[in-house]
Amino acid sequence: MADFTIKQGDTRPGMTAQLKDAGEVIDLTAATSVTLKMAPDAGGSLIVNSPCVFVDRPVGKVMYEWVAGDTDDVGLFDIEFEIIWSDGGIETVPNDDVEGNDGPYYVVEVKADLDP
């Protein structure tokens, strides 16, 4: 089951996510950046490794704005968010199994477009 679905070649809508650790919202007030990482499967080559935009730091909301090339390939893709904290610490979420998914990743589905 996908957490977000988009059509092949599309760059909108952006993907908004609320980051959590063990079910608790992560306050991103002290975060310097959040990066979306996306690969066809765990351990595969990254096809997205790009910064997110902060939407609402205290409630852990970020948005990733797709760019050309991000959604060229059809299929299911594992994603995670890497948070860089102001003290230099790094935290990757999700860091435990996501309910309904196969492992500790969110899933994006890119569906075929009739005119790719």
Image (cartoon, helix red, strand yellow):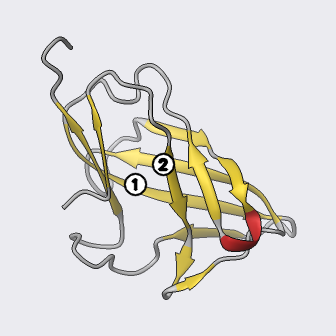
The picture places residue 103, in percent across and down from the top left corner, at 27, 73
Q: Secondary structure at mark 2?
A: strand
Question: Cα distance, mark 2 to mark 1?
Answer: 5 Å
| Residue nearest the viewer, comparing 86 with 30 | 30
Left or right: residue 77 compared with residue 16: left
**Residue visible at 58% across and 48% down?**
63
Whether the residues at callouts 2 and 1 have beta carbons within 8 Å, the answer is: yes
Q: How many residues crowd mark 1 within 10 Å: few (<14), some (14–19), many (20+)?
A: many
Q: How many residues crowd mark 2 within 10 Å: few (<14), some (14–19), many (20+)?
A: some
Q: Write down the residue under mark 2.
A: 37
User: How many numbered marks, from 0 up?
Assistant: 2
The picture places residue 32, in percent across and down from the top left corner, at 81, 57
**Residue visible at 50% across and 25% down?**
67
Left or right: residue 101 compared with residue 54: left
Q: Write down the residue under mark 1.
A: 79
**Residue type, label 2:** Lys
| Residue 70 to residue 93: above or below | above
Q: Secondary structure at mark 1?
A: strand
**Residue visible at 44% across and 26% down?**
11
Q: Residue furthest top?
A: 115
